[in-house]
Image (cartoon, coloured by chain):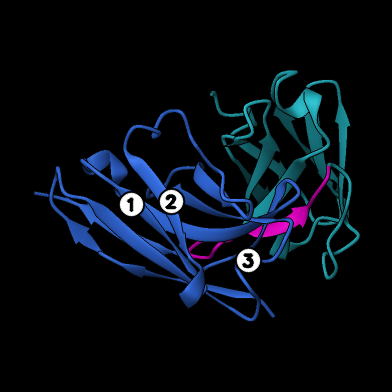
């Protein structure tokens, strides 16, 4: 059974870089037909798609975050990562890593809370 | 890209049926079969309930069903139960090869 687990920085100051890793177990991150995505949810608010890394190597980002986001993959360790630079309080959220299959997201990681505060 | 539009809240009594709408454009909901729905209980990660507009993943109750007409997708919960009280989100693939989520709907079981 595929499982995803987020880890990384939990508390940041404004202007710092958010860095999260998603470890994938129970399946290969290099499997054809899948993409690997990050989604976030600010406290008390809705879901926001951040971007994804397609198995072919292409990456796609939310236009509103595109200038600050990088998603990359580490195939040797079966994990992928998220970097978001120049963070502000508005980036405070629970960050989920998720596998995407043909237009839907499943399974989801448990989520990692990242807080930005001076 | 703008979030898909969902009603903020929907309520119903146990045993009743409710429907949640999800309105987008021809560049997302109306243009693709890649509309999905997620259930989220407080403090938990979202759970996939419907994929490809109408398909129910293994293990999801058949009380949940999806449909689409034009630029609006819908999730119907029949035989409403207390455990269905949660937040629900729709999602769609877009013409830019990106994804967009709905604004979210809080379902209350009266």
Q: In the image, is A14 to the left or to the right of B90?
A: left
Q: Which color was chain B given?
A: cyan
For image coordinates 69% across by 36% down, the residue present is B92
Q: Chain of mark 3?
A: A
Q: Are marks 3 and 2 on the same chain?
A: yes
Tags 3 and 2 in contact by the CB under 8 Å rule?
A: no
Residue A114 pos. (x, y %): 29, 58
Residue A103 pos. (x, y %): 73, 46
Residue B22 pos. (x, y %): 71, 31
Q: Residues within 10 Å of mark 2 (few under 14, many from 20)?
A: many
Q: Secondary structure at mark 2?
A: strand
Q: Quadrant of residue A2?
A: bottom right
Residue A6 appears anywhere in the view: yes
Mark before the other along the chain sequence, 1 or 3: 3
Q: In the image, is A90 to the left or to the right of A60?
A: left
Mark before the other along the chain sequence, 3 or 2: 3
Distance in Å between CA atoms under marks 1 and 3: 20 Å
Q: Are marks 2 and 1 on the same chain?
A: yes
Q: Secondary structure at mark 3?
A: loop
Mark before the other along the chain sequence, 2 or 1: 2
Residue A25 pos. (x, y %): 57, 79
Magenta stretch in the rendered image: B41-52
Q: Given this view, does label 1 or label 3 mark the residue nearer the observer?
A: 3
Q: Chain of mark 2?
A: A
Q: Are marks 1 and 3 on the same chain?
A: yes
Q: Which residue is mark 2?
A: A71
Q: Is residue B97 above or below residue A12?
A: above
Q: Is residue A31 above or below residue B11?
A: below
Q: Which residue is mark 3?
A: A30
Q: Which residue is mark 1?
A: A83
For image coordinates 13% across by 51% down, the residue present is A13
């Amino acid at each position: 059974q595929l499982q995803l687990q987020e880890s990384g920085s939990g508390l940041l100051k404004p202007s710092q870089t958010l860095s999260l890793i998603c470890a994938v177990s129970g399946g290969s991150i290099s499997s054809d037909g899948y993409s690997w995505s990050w989604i976030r949810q600010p406290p008390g608010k809705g879901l926001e798609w951040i971007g994804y890394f397609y198995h072919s190597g292409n990456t796609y980002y939310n236009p509103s975050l595109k200038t600050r986001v990088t998603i990359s993959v580490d195939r040797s360790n079966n994990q992928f990562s998220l970097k978001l630079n120049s963070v502000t309080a508005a980036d405070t959220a629970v960050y989920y890593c998720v596998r995407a299959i043909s237009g839907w997201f499943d399974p989801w990681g448990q989520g990692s809370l990242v807080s930005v505060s001076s | 890209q703008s979030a898909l539009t969902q009603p903020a809240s929907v309520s119903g009594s146990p045993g009743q049926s409710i429907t949640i709408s999800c309105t987008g454009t021809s560049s997302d909901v109306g243009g693709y079969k890649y509309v999905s729905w997620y259930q989220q209980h407080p403090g938990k990660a979202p759970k996939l309930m419907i994929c490809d507009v109408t398909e129910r993943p293994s293990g999801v109750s058949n009380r949940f069903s999806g449909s689409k007409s034009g630029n609006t997708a819908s999730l119907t919960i029949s035989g409403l139960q207390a455990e269905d009280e949660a937040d629900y989100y729709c999602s769609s693939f877009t013409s830019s090869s990106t994804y967009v989520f709905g604004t979210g709907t809080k379902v209350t079981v009266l």
